[in-house]
Amino acid sequence: MVPASASIGHQISLQVALRRLSAIKAYSGSFPSSSLSLSTKGTKMSTPSENRQPAPWRDILDSHLQQTPGYEFTIATIGYDAQQRPVPRVRTCGCRGFFPELELHPKGQEAMDQQVEGGGNPPVFESDMLSFTTDARMDKLPQLESSGHAIEAVFWLKDLMTQWRIKGTAYAIGNPSGEDAEEEKISRNEIRKALRVRGDNDSDIAKWTWEKAVTKYFANHSPVARGSFRNPHPGQPRSSTPNQLDLKLGQKVLDLHDSVARENFRVVVIRPEEVERLDLTDQEDAKRWNWTLIDGNDGSRWNEVELWP
Ligand SMILES: Cc1cc2nc3c(=O)[nH]c(=O)nc-3n(C[C@H](O)[C@H](O)[C@H](O)COP(=O)(O)O)c2cc1C
């Protein structure tokens, strides 16, 4: 079992209590991006910011994705060539929706019910952050780390004649060492800042853990797809023999805590800063909207501008 010790629940409960005790400023349609900081067990942890509304583009994108079964997006990161010049790198990835609200297929939920305490996390959080999964051995994670986490994702939803571009920063979670790994700690802190508490679920927050959140994404893969995280090192010459006997193609993984696969499995969470929708439904009157996250003294808010296409 993955230890549940790294729960953010108690920190968030404190934050919720603080939120209730203090007079909350009402932000109409605004997004405070600043987060409270609480000192817990000597570690200064940031917690989800309070009183945020969903981004104005979120429901539209969500509805477009709901209408597009099996959607992939193109993920761009920045790499460096042999002369250390920045170079764009793009690849296709399967979008896994808004973190952490993954809807599991029945077999995945069955595995969670059997292998994870409580069958997984209570549905206490939502966000405007899109997610995908990856193998820590691939190039995109070091590229994120060496470029200030810069990322852009693009969807071309042909049935809707719409392109969506989401620019921001991205953070990977799922390191089995938890917050002992510096990158994992940074990622959790950055993601936490943009989580929203759903409705009035405060009593369940203490049960929420990062480990269960990541395990749910792992459960959402078929046994063969989970097995791909036990493949030989992605991107290495096929002629090179893996030095670990566990690493071979075509394995099926039923154990959600399989230590070899979980060593490599990561969930990447994109924190959007700029979003653009291009609607080509009417080619004579194409439409283009841009939303930019603007930081202010009392938090941040999305600025919407309609652009010439
Ligand atoms: C349809 C499709 C879906 C894919 N989904 C993912 C995915 O969800 N995550 C991922 O890391 N790679 C995915 N890949 C593979 C990537 O495109 C890419 O080959 C791999 O991530 C290695 O890229 P990197 O070394 O630049 O990180 C997918 C490829 C295709 C064609």
Image (cartoon, grey):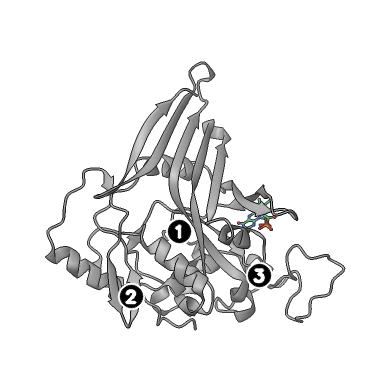
Marks 2/3: CA distance?
A: 28 Å
Q: Position of residue 211 (x, y in %)?
A: 46, 74
Marks 1/3: CA distance?
A: 21 Å
Q: Amino acid at mark 1?
A: Glu
Farthest-out residue, right? 239
Which residue in the structure is indicated by mark 3?
229
Neighbourhood count class around disc 2 (C-alpha, 10 Å): few under 14, some 14–19, many 20 upward: some
Disc 1 vs disc 3: Cβ atoms closer than 8 Å? no
Q: Nearer the viewer, residue 38 or 268?
A: 38
Q: Is residue 184 above or below residue 282?
A: below
> Could you tell me which residue is drawn at 17 percent across and 49 percent down?
26
Q: In the rendered structure, which disc, 2 or 1, sits on the residue that comes first in sequence?
A: 1
Which residue in the structure is indicated by mark 2?
207
Which residue in the structure is indicated by mark 1?
103
Q: Amino acid at mark 2?
A: Lys
- Asked which secondary structure carries label 2, the reply is helix
Q: In the rendered structure, which disc, 2 or 3, sits on the residue that comes first in sequence?
A: 2
> Could you tell me which residue is drawn at 49 percent across and 53 percent down?
169
Q: Amino acid at mark 3?
A: Phe
Task: Give the side of residue 306 with respect to residue 152, left or right.
Answer: left
